[in-house]
Amino acid sequence: MLNRIALAAATVSLSSLTALAEPVGIPACDEFLTKYEACLVSNAKDDEKEFTKAMVDGVRQGFAEDLKKMGREKAEEECKKAPVEMKDFFSSRGCPPL
């Protein structure tokens, strides 16, 4: 999962943010992304906020692609694992566990 964040941060351009901000359509994914985006952006320095939004939107896009490739059930499993797998990453940025 952390690789997904690194890849998302490297590949998502800021100009594509509005296209990526659509909900995934799986409640577990959307809840996870909404809560952590709010925490990460609020804790980010002003000059890091846009990058942070792009990073979260990249993860959102990854979950949407998982939905298309793996189907709803497997994509939902990935979303449910994400808070546990990414706990240290979010904790290091001041975000509480879900």
Image: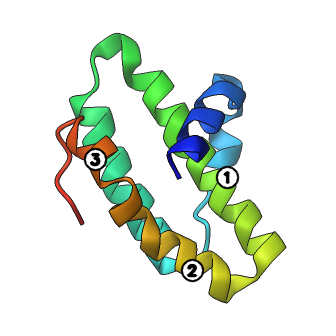
* Residue at which label 1 appears: 61
Specify whether 50 is left or right of 42: right
Could you say where residue 13 lies in the image, as x and y percent from the top left?
69, 25
* Residue at which label 3 appears: 88
Placement of the C terminus among the 4 image quadrants: bottom left
Decide which of 36, 7 is in the foreground and name it.
7
Q: CA distance from mark 2 to mark 3?
A: 21 Å
Specify whether 26 is left or right of 91: right
Q: Earlier in the sequence, mark 3 or mark 1?
A: 1
Report the coloring of the rendering.
Answer: rainbow
Q: Earlier in the sequence, mark 1 or mark 2?
A: 1
Could you say where residue 43 lies in the image, as x and y percent from the top left?
22, 31
| Amino acid at dot 3 | Asp
Specify whether 48 is left or right of 22: left
Q: CA distance from mark 3 to mark 1?
A: 22 Å
Asked if disc 3 and disc 1 are in contact, CB closer than 8 Å, the reply is no
Mark 1, mark 2: which one is toward the viewer? 2
Decide which of 21, 71 is in the foreground and name it.
71
Numbered label attached to residue 76? 2
Could you say where residue 78 lies in the image, as x and y percent from the top left?
55, 72
Q: Is residue 11 above or below residue 67?
A: above
